[in-house]
Image (cartoon, rainbow, N blue to C red):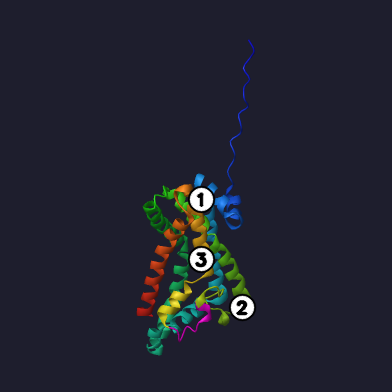
């Protein structure tokens, strides 16, 4: 009897490493998100996002100054303009004390925000029979949020190059429509709406849609994935702008 030939066992193909995924999100999003969909991870991108946001906050406070930032915000409010000078200054002083707390609260707020966004997207894609799991959607959202790291790095560069009095905290990079409007004469609703027409927001939504489509495969079209993110985003933007028009 001749011994049976044993077929060699093919090695299991290895997925992308965490750092390869970080790079791949920018240069090969389709391939990267397909890998993320198969093996969802989120800790590394989330840590990078939080660290870059903290770095942005530190430079903002040290180079621009919280008092200047709050004063800029207060003076752009029509309601604040109606206050007596003493009350306005007191409001600015209190805001300058509270601003660092809210700035560093991003350590908690960013992950919480991503959890909420992921829950909404999971519900939206479920209505389209996308068949996704929460951990897949959350991993997609965390990796898509890396676009914000680019914003933070460019924002830090702009802050260091500009004089503090020339830095506009509302439009640090001038990549949204509102950057080309007069904040004092434009209606608050329209101005707030225009701030959301932002290149980085659109970039993140594109990445999320790409990620959802890649993770879901044939169960979800790219158009469906894009709809899943654009519809809730549009509702949020409209509500935010309406509140700005009423209370600013």
Q: Secondary structure at mark 2?
A: loop
Instruction: Looking at the picture, tell me which residue is in the foreground, 21 or 166.
Output: 21
Tell me if mark 2 has few (under 14), some (14-19) or many (20+) residues whose alpha carbon lies within 10 angstroms of its own: few
Highlighted magenta segment, given as a residue range: 178-186
Q: Nearer the viewer, mark 2 or mark 1?
A: 1
| Residue that mark 3 sits on | 202
Say the numbered circle drawn on residue 162.
2
- The residue located at (47%, 81%) in the rendering is 71
Q: Residue furthest left?
A: 246
Quadrant containing the N terminus is: top right
State whether the magenta stretch is mostly helix, strand or loop: loop
Instruction: Looking at the picture, tell me which residue is in the foreground, 74 or 99.
Output: 74
Q: Which corner quadrant of the image does residue 146 belong to?
A: bottom right
Decide: is 46 above or below 238.
above
Q: Secondary structure at mark 3?
A: helix
- The residue located at (46%, 61%) in the rendering is 110
- Spatial CA distance of label 3 from label 2 is 26 Å
Say the numbered circle drawn on residue 214.
1
Q: Is residue 75 left or right of residue 8?
A: left
Relative image position of residue 20 (x, y in whole percent): 61, 50
């Amino acid at each position: 009897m001749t011994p049976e030939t044993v077929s060699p066992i093919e090695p299991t193909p290895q997925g992308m490493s965490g750092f390869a995924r970080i790079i791949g999100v920018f240069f090969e999003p389709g391939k990267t998100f397909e890998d993320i969909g198969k093996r969802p991870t989120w800790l590394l991108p989330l840590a990078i996002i939080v660290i870059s946001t903290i770095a942005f906050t530190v430079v903002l406070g040290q180079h621009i100054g919280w008092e200047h930032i709050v004063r800029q915000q207060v003076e752009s409010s029509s309601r604040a303009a109606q206050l007596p000078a003493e009350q306005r200054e007191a409001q600015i002083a209190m805001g300058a004390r509270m601003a660092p707390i809210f700035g560093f609260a991003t350590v908690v707020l960013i992950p919480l925000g991503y959890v909420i966004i992921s829950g909404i997207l999971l519900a939206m894609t479920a209505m389209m029979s996308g068949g996704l799991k929460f951990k897949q959607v959350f991993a997609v959202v965390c990796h898509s949020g890396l676009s914000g790291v680019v914003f933070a790095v460019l924002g830090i560069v702009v802050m260091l190059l500009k004089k503090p009095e020339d830095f506009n905290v509302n439009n640090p990079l001038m990549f949204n429509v509102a950057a080309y409007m007069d904040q004092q004469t434009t209606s608050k609703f329209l101005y707030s709406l225009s701030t959301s027409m932002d290149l980085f927001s659109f970039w993140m939504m594109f990445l999320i849609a790409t990620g959802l489509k890649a993770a879901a495969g044939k169960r979800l079209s790219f158009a469906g994935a894009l709809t899943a993110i654009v519809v809730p985003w549009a509702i949020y933007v409209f509500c935010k702008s309406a509140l700005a028009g009423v209370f600013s």
